[in-house]
Image (cartoon, helix red, strand yellow):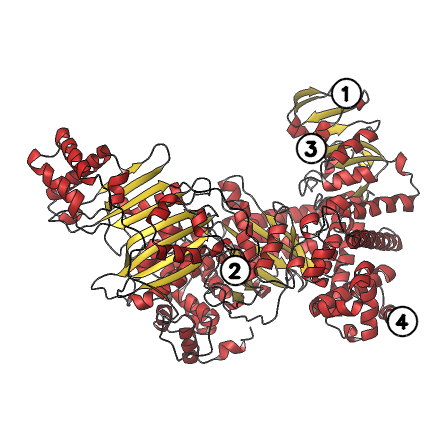
Amino acid sequence: MSTPSELQVPVNQRLAALNSAHSSEASMGRVQNLPGYNTPIFKGKEEQRALVEADVAAKGFVPRELVGNEVNWFYTNLGIDDTYFQNESREVISDHIIALFGAKILAYTKHDPAKLVIDLERIDENGNGATFIHTSPPGLTTTEGPGSTCETRIDDLFLDKSTPENAFRLETFRSAGSISATASQQLRCYFVTKCNLPPKPAALKDGEKTDIKTVSDPAFLDRATSNTLDIYQKASFPQTRYGPVIEVFEVEGTRERRLVIGYKMGGTSRFFSALSNLYHFYSLYSSRKYVEQFSNGITIISLYLNPLPDSKAPPIEHSIFQVLREASLLFCLPDNPFFLPKAPGSHAVQEATYAYCGWVFAQHFCNRLGPAYLQLKNVLNENDPAHAEVLNDIKRRFREETFTRESIAQVIQAHPELVSPVLIFLTAFSLMILKIRLLYVNFAMVHYPTVDNPNNLMPTLSYQRLQNVQPHSDEELYDKIRRTVTSKQDLQVLESFLIFNKHVLKTNFYQPTKVALSFRLRPEFLPEVEYPKKPFGMFFVIGNEFRGFHIRFRDVARGGIRIVMSRNKENYSINQRMLFDENYNLASTQSLKNKDIPEGGAKGTILPSLGAPPKLCFEKYVDAVIDLLIPGQTPGIKEPLVDLYGKPELLFFGPDEGTADMMDWAALHAKARGADSWWMSFTTGKSAERLGGVPHDTYGMTSLSVRQYVVGIYKQLGLREKDITKVQTGGPDGDLGSNEILLSSDKTVAVIDGSGVLADPHGIDRAELVRLAKLRVPVGRFDQSKLSKDGYLVKVEDQDVKLPSGEVVLDGTDFRNSAHLRFKADLFVPCGGRPEAVNISNVSALVDVDGKAHFKYVVEGANLFLTQQARLHLEKRKVVLFKDSSANKGGVTSSSLEVLAGLSLSTEEYTDLMIFKDGKPSPFYQSYVKDVQQKISENASNEFTCIWKEHARLQGQKTRTAISDELSQTLNNLQAELENSDLFDDAPSRFGVMKRAIPKTLVDQIGLETLLKRLPEAYQRALFSSWVASHFIYKYGVNGSSVDFFHFARELASTA
């Protein structure tokens, strides 16, 4: 691995630079030493005290001579806020006083005042709030007893569930006095009350700010001082920003610091309780804490922090800035199991967060197959369907059994000597954190950000922690790992952390604010035996509610973002193990489909945790990726990061499973984040009226490509469409299915969709099918009076249905799931259905006992409907089959030209030309859509002709499936060669190609020279090379010679 120049800086200079990046001498707001909240005065307190005293005496548990003293101590000496006495009934208060007395008696019997534990709580049965009171040592997170779970319960029951319509505010105080004259413990009191928020305000226009008083709970306004209102007004900016706002204020004349954090309601979970662990780690304690909710969807936490008396910890003047910085990491992963309550040998949030990220990385990228699998792979023939199935089964079993989450943790726990020469008895998780300290330092030495003046500022605590561990070079650290472990499996796990460090090119790990952690990785570490085709780039994203990847196979690439949902815990475990492989395979397949457009194949996957909101996961994923695409320029919010890649990157996202309705948000969010030049092209599949997208279903983009293959077969074989019988999966309610119905005139004998199975051997009534397709409703809505005597409709909810043939269908869902295997027709066009619906295990059902296939022609419109082995099996039975990556590429062509429009037009032009006015498209938009449709038909027709000619030339010795794959690979390889060649530098050739590659409507509107000034050079090279490669291959075939290309290139220049 070549070492970037930044890593060649001597260690002492690098440490000095790290020092400056997070100095404790950062700017800090200062507030007057005045109350942030008005202290409530309960006017009926004395009257209530007398009644409570009578109640306590009447219950008889406390001796009468002690009742007055106990009640007086509770009301006066404990220092409980008047909020408690005002909110609680006298019955509850008397019960609490008796409980406190009982706890004192129990502690006395143990002859240890320190054993005095108070646990008082009341949760309103109508859901209006709660009160919690328990003993609480300042500056420590208790690991047992009531205090160990109180704050997490408040998070789970109230704060995390808050919405503008049903929100809860929290006030919590530390009692000023001790429990009794003999016990020094203090009480922590929590008061949760339901908010009475005003209606949610209208969306803000650009430049507008919400007046905090218009979105506040009356109880908050009654208590908050003008100083607090001013502070909260500033902290409410997350309404226009996705990440948290974190501010710290010095209270004049004291050492107290006020930490204020504002964020979008529901943007994280268990954050309030996690913050206690954070400031306790730095030997700070809170005197008061508040959580306020606002009807504009903002939550604000305010903590009043003080240093523990007589503590040997660093002064609060330093530690508060570490708390501020690490609160951002905690916001991303508040439920991180590796960040422990303060204990001997425990570690800070940065180290714990790194431990979590490395742990997740190891789960995905430990090489689980090994040499045994490679030997078996070399012996078996992957082109043989039976052999391929065996290899897949073995690969799946290796992945499930070799490295689990638990086994990876155990390996790291077994080698503490890699981290520290001092072995301390810790919990398993604590040991795990301890073990990766050296690896964390190795990571931080590269990615800790620097500033220009390393000597002006005082060292921060994180810098001091780095100084305490002698950094190792990659070679020294690997040698230490190798010498420490004896098991090869252990070595692989520990190596994975080092591999992670070596291949991170940039990360938002040290950004002041973020919502999830993102890493741009070099993919060179992927083992060839598992991933034979090396991706161009990888993004790895980790959030509290999800994990995700993005893989692209070329610099300029586009693909959909898929949300992988899990039905249950077992299904989640399977999805987790297979997430990266699914992402890799989808992106690789996309590369085959994107053969004749500028963008290479890409794909993103997001795996939400069980119960996590998919939309929240998607939004955090997008925001974290954008962190690595836009240079940080706002101190304290988004700052410059260490970028070892060193070049600007553009990603293009598209819709996929679970994200079709999220593309608008992603584009607008990119715009809000400052992506002025590319927000319009960041996503495809945007709504046409709102954001000028080009919807595939409205204009039949995917169907146009599929139809070219269907019509091509008819033309080549001299067939009349009206004589052709057809089976179709994917019904009239879907994009591809509805357009296939509307564009065709064949005799359709069966349509299978999510609602059931519609069949008629005499041909389904075409007019009724067209009616359903125009309404976009499923076959379950078919008028059954239009069926012949031999036709039928079986819905998924039906049971015990008798078909005209006499066959009885026991279960409609089971019948639907296998119906595509029972029908016979001339043509089969899958327009929908699950991936691998036809595979090596069931493809034999499509062939009669005499070897005759059920279909003569198959045009695979649905992605991955057939497995590769199934396609080859059918082609051996003389089926004319065109696979998905050739047949259904119309959608990707349309999306590619949607990207081009976004990159070519300024924001003003895009708004004027692409976004609808009064619900109607502009003449430019209509003309551009026609250009897109023409390009789709042209590309599909060219590829069909090329495949057909090559198959005829070889006299059927090579399958059309193999030819399609070879064509895609040849096109991709030629395009890559052309991108790196000097042909693009030849101006006449470049202008000639660009004039034909860019739609005429766009050239006429903007002008070619202006377009070439606006389009990024990387995109221009990709557009140029894709057009040249595809038109050369489609003209001369996959075996075109160098001489052929010479003549072709001369033609390019002559058209300039």
Hey, what amino acid is under mark 1? Ser
Between the C-alphas of marks 1 and 4, the distance is 66 Å
Mark 1: give few (<14), some (14-19) or many (20+) Cα within 10 Å.
few
Left or right of 848? Residue 231 is left
Q: Earlier in the sequence, mark 1 or mark 4?
A: 1
Nearer to me, 322 or 95: 95
Q: Is residue 225 above or below residue 1027?
A: above
Between the C-alphas of marks 2 and 3, the distance is 42 Å
Hey, what amino acid is under mark 3? Ser
Q: Nearer the viewer, mark 3 or mark 4?
A: 4
Left or right of 505? Residue 1004 is right
Disc 2 secondary structure class: strand
- Residue at 82%, 62% (x, y): give it: 1004
The residue carrying mark 2 is: 518
Mark 4: give few (<14), some (14-19) or many (20+) Cα within 10 Å.
few
* Residue 1026 screen position, x and y as percent: 77, 63
Q: Earlier in the sequence, mark 2 or mark 4?
A: 2
Disc 4 secondary structure class: helix
Q: Earlier in the sequence, mark 1 or mark 2?
A: 2
> Residue 1054's mark?
4
Q: Earlier in the sequence, mark 2 or mark 3?
A: 2
Between the C-alphas of marks 1 and 2, the distance is 59 Å
Q: Quadrant of the C terminus?
A: bottom right
> Residue 805's mark?
1
Q: Are marks 1 and 3 in contact (CB under 8 Å)?
A: no
* Residue 1011 screen position, x and y as percent: 75, 67
Between the C-alphas of marks 2 and 4, the distance is 48 Å
- Residue at 8%, 38% (x, y): give it: 66
